[in-house]
Amino acid sequence: MSEHENDAWSAPSNEAIVLSLVAPAAAGGVKPIASFKPKYTYTIFNDEQIFGYQDLRVNIQFNASDMRPHFGLNYSKKFKPTGDTEATDLKEVFSEYLPEVAFQKQKEFTAAVEHTRTDWTPPGKLTSTFRKEDVTYEVWKGNLADPAVKQLVNRIQVFVPLYIEGGTYIDVDEPESDRWTIFFLYQKRPVAHEPERLSYVFVGYSTVYRFFLFHIPTPLASPSRNKSVDQLDFTEEFDLSSLPCRTRISQFIVLPPFQQKGIGSTFYSILFQEYLNHAPTVEITVEDPNEAFDDMRDLTDLQFLRRLPEFNALHIDTSLKIDKHGIVPRNIFDKAAAEVVRRTAKIAPRQFYRVLEMHLMSRLPESVRPGIVDPEAGEAPKGKAVTAKPTKEQEYEYRLWQLIAKKRVYRHNKELLGQLEMPERIAKLTETVENVAFDYARLLDKAERRFDDGEEEEEEEDDEEDEASDVEAVRTGNKNGKRKADGVAEAEDEEPAIKRRKA
């Protein structure tokens, strides 16, 4: 078969696949609520191409409430097998990603949607309610030990490879699946033909996993009895869920029709607050977020931390004297006080100190603070707004801030930078920190425009993630200096990641 003939029978999978949420129609049957395309399909189809069809459309419908799926296929022509070449068996392909119920006949799916119970509620327990643009949203929390939660997860996991780069499914049948907590995000909206009644529409979900953390109590004693460690009987039964843990937000998805509404940041804040109040959780981490999530997380964490007086009290100590040829001072800011805030906020070290760097940069005098030029003004996207010539004191404060950032970047990229000659090493480190500063300026500009107006926008300690991401910035001269994204290195703990992760 020639290349031209092959192209005639190939279709881009990102365009051919259409996902939709449907609900019962007033006159019978189903009606669409929202339709959207996948972002990634390369883990399902090689080169994101589907062979063997013309005018192909793969329709995957979901009952908007219980997310029961239905797989449908439409095309004008199908390739006739020639030797070993044949059309892709799409039903077989998707049988690995959708539950068996998805392949029932259309009339059975339609009947199931039509007969959706009027009193249906999401599985689990209602944990939070919020409003956006006069619409009510609810967050429901459940565990995989609940069969209803398990069923819903099986129905919606197809979104993982479609919207999380490198994302993989949860094994809902693994022996320790009870360590997974699932948060379902639903919108409540009036039923079209019965406005007095509200129905649930699936918006997104997040999975959270607990890693038990070795943590020595102070003083060394049993949490349940006043015994020293050498007196404990480790054969007695105790509640594993009460052990200290590191809590990881693993998968986080808000479906495309509901994005860019500030829903994601509110959802993340609810999850964060849930585990901030969870006594066994020592640290809240995030696994391999993409750039959009990273931005949202940075802004939300910054907003949260700025509410803490102890965080706002952190500042650059300009009384420090720097020896031009000496080592970088340890306490350009009060590291001990910062660590108290970090542990109280339960934020992982790399995330906390990045946000602190951003915050300290925002407190620099305007004359030396790195900034951006508004692209809408037709100017270059990178620059520095200077209102007056900086004084020597202001320049010195900025130099101290640079040393904070340089020290962190160098520490996490010591091995790579050590391979460079000294002049090149200094130049590369300076370039990377400039890019980091520009990215902070970009985020701070967003924070000022959105949070200041009362609006919101939509993971010596575990340093592997910092190292991998900053190395990426050093290698590529990554213009935003961020943790490499789209969903990049290991997460903020030492456990294996199930996906991929910015500086």
Image (cartoon, rainbow, N blue to C red):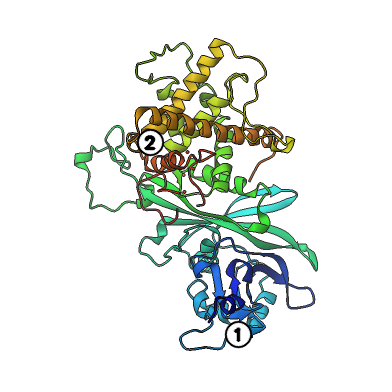
Residue 266 numbered tag: none
Element class at badge 1: strand
Residue at the image point whose x is 55% and y is 28% from the top: 359
| Quadrant of res 28 | bottom right
Image coordinates of residue 188 in percent, x first then y, are 69, 58
Q: Give me the C-alpha separation between circle 2 and circle 1.
A: 54 Å
Relative to 133, is 20 above or below? below
Kind of residue at disc 2: His
- Residue 88 or 245: which is nearer the viewer? 88
Q: Is residue 6 visible?
A: yes
Left/right placement of residue 148 relative to residue 116 reads left
Relative to 12, is 238 above or below? above
Residue at the image point whose x is 37% and y is 42% from the top: 464
Relative to 270, is 160 above or below? below
| Quadrant of res 367 | top right
Kind of residue at disc 1: Lys
Can you identify the residue that label 1 sits on?
78
Question: Foreground mark, 2 or 1?
Answer: 1
Mark sitting earlier along the chain (2/1): 1
Left/right placement of residue 457 relative to residue 420 reads right
Image coordinates of residue 123 in percent, x first then y, are 56, 63
